């Protein structure tokens, strides 16, 4: 469940998890948290589009 617009982003999950959607960097490590592509029960998405991420790794 959540709401996301161009200027506002909110989900109750932010009170449970520090990283809840998007790309995060700490030191030299990255964490990508996917928003998912569906729901079970109530479709509590307003402005949060379903997402399937494709991550391509390349040798440095």
Image (cartoon, rainbow, N blue to C red):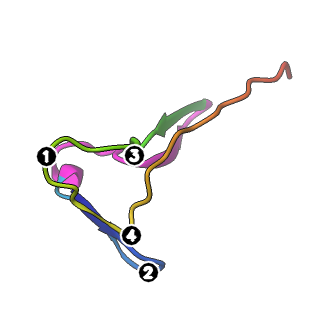
Image quadrant of residue 16? top left
Q: Residue at x 49, y 46 (%)?
A: 51
Q: Return the x and y of residue 27 as percentages of the image width and height.
A: 57, 34
Give the residues in magenta: 13-28
Q: Residue at x 40, y 43 (%)?
A: 37
Q: Return the x and y of residue 56 as percentages of the image width and height.
A: 73, 28
Q: Which residue is mark 1?
A: 41
Q: Residue at x 66, y 31 (%)?
A: 55
Please tell me which of labels 4 and 1 falls first in the chain.
Answer: 1
Q: Residue at x 39, y 41 (%)?
A: 36
Labels 4 & 3 near each other (Cβ < 8 A): no
Spatial separation of the CA atoms under disc 4 and disc 2: 11 Å
Q: Which residue is mark 3?
A: 35
Q: Which residue is mark 2?
A: 7
Is label 3 or label 1 in front? 1
Please tell me which of labels 4 and 2 falls first in the chain.
Answer: 2
Please tell me which of labels 4 and 3 falls first in the chain.
Answer: 3
Spatial separation of the CA atoms under disc 1 and disc 2: 27 Å
Q: Secondary structure at mark 3?
A: loop
Image side of residue 28 versus residue 12, left or right: right
Q: Return the x and y of residue 34 as percentages of the image width and height.
A: 44, 40
Labels 3 & 2 near each other (Cβ < 8 A): no
Spatial separation of the CA atoms under disc 3 and disc 1: 16 Å
| Residue 2 visible here | yes
Label 3 Cα crowd, 10 Å radius (few <14 / some 14-19 / many 20+): some
Q: Secondary structure at mark 4?
A: loop
Q: Is residue 25 above or below residue 12?
A: above
- Nearest to the observer: residue 16 or residue 55: 55
Q: Which residue is mark 4?
A: 47
Image quarter of the C terminus: top right
């Amino acid at each position: 469940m959540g709401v996301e617009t161009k200027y506002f982003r909110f989900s109750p999950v932010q009170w449970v998890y520090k990283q809840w959607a998007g790309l995060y960097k700490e030191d030299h490590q990255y964490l990508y948290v996917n928003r998912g592509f569906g729901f079970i029960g109530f479709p509590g998405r307003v402005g949060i589009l379903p997402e399937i991420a494709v991550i391509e790794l390349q040798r440095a």
